[in-house]
Every structure is written in C-alpha cells, then in structure tokens.
Image (spheres, grey):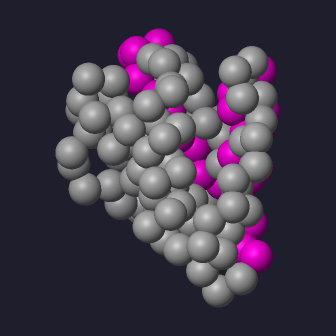
C-alpha cells in the first residue's frame, strides 16, 4: 500500500486511518530519514487506537508507553547500538502485553523484529510531501 501526503496533518491522518486497522500485538517497523514524519504518523496511529495522550518521540527515553483501549508502545532505536540493548529493556515483554509496538529506526535492531512486523517506510518527496509505503504483516 502506498499513501501520498502533502502536509503533516495529512501524514497524521494517514496514521490515524492505519491505527484503526491495527490489532493488539501488531508491530510496525518504521524506516525513514530524520524528519521524514515517522513520529507524526505514529501520533495518528495513537489517535486511531483511541489514545488521547500527546505523543512525542522517545529519543532519550527509548520507549514511551501510552495507555488506551489498545496501548501503544513507541520505541526510538536511534541511540541503540544493537538489538541486545533492546532485549535488555524488555522487548519480549512488550511484544506480549497486548498493545501495538511502533519502532522508529528499526534498521538499528532489525534482527529483533518479528517476521510478521509491518514495514512503514516514509520518504520526503517535497518540503511537506511524503510517500508512505506500508507492507508486510499479512494484512497490508
């Protein structure tokens, strides 16, 4: 599935639409350059999951947890050197807690991603325009 957006608001809306289709246990593996819109898309995912909290990047905390009808676990792997560090913070526990895991900078921990993870690649195609490619997970 390919989605084209022309503003941050449209990127958030695309994430919200996807969030409404997600199930507990889903893992979204995000790829894209710094400033591509990964966190904006995840803000929308949270909205689609029924989460009212303000979503921000967990760059310094590694993971932010957002309670809701389906909890959201938002990971930022930018500062991790390997998947070993991810396992040290309880990655396997997060996978079994009945929430949705959104993982930014997946390339740093690719070997820890479950085979059924949904890949979300966000590319800048203009100042505010984005091309969002969603694949995998058996449903997308």
Q: Residue 111 in magenta?
A: yes
Residue 125 lies left or right of residue 77; in this view the side is right
Q: Which residue is drawn at 53% across and 61% down?
A: 11
Q: Which residue is drawn at 53% across and 74% down?
A: 7
**Above/below status of 35 relative to 2:** below
Q: Position of residue 44 (x, y in %)?
A: 42, 50
Name the quadrant containing residue 105: bottom right
Q: Where is residue 129 in the image (x, y as percent from the top left)?
A: 65, 75
State the quadrant of the C terminus: top right
Q: Which of 29 and 22 is in front in this view?
A: 22
Residue 100 lies left or right of residue 127; in this view the side is left
State the quadrant of the N terminus: top right
Q: Nearer the viewer, residue 58 or 24?
A: 24
Q: Magenta residues, as a range?
A: 96-125
Residue 8 lies left or right of residue 99; in this view the side is right
Q: Nearer the viewer, residue 53 or 44?
A: 44
**Above/below status of 97 relative to 81:** above
Total labels drawn: 0
Q: Residue 65 in magenta?
A: no
Q: Position of residue 14 (x, y in %)?
A: 53, 51
Q: Which residue is drawn at 36% across and 60% down?
A: 56
**Above/below status of 131 relative to 114:** below
Q: Report whether residue 53 is seen.
A: yes
Name the quadrant containing residue 74: top left
Q: Report whether residue 34 is seen.
A: no
Name the quadrant containing residue 31: bottom right
Q: Position of residue 57 (x, y in %)?
A: 42, 60
Q: Nearer the viewer, residue 84 or 34?
A: 34
Q: Residue at x 38, y 38 (%)?
A: 48
């Amino acid at each position: 599935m390919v989605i084209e957006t022309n503003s941050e608001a449209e990127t958030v809306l695309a994430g919200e639409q996807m969030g409404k289709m997600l199930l507990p246990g889903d893992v979204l593996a995000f790829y894209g350059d710094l400033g591509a819109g990964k966190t904006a898309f995840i803000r929308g995912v949270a909205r689609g999951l029924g989460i009212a909290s303000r979503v921000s990047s967990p760059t310094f905390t590694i993971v932010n947890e957002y309670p809701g009808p389906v909890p959201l676990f938002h990971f930022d792997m930018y500062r991790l050197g390997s998947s070993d560090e991810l396992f040290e913070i309880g990655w396997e526990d997060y996978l079994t807690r009945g929430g949705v895991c959104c993982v930014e900078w997946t390339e740093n921990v690719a070997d820890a991603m479950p085979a059924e993870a949904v890949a979300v690649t966000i590319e800048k195609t203009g100042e505010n325009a984005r091309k969002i490619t969603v694949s995998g997970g058996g449903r997308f």
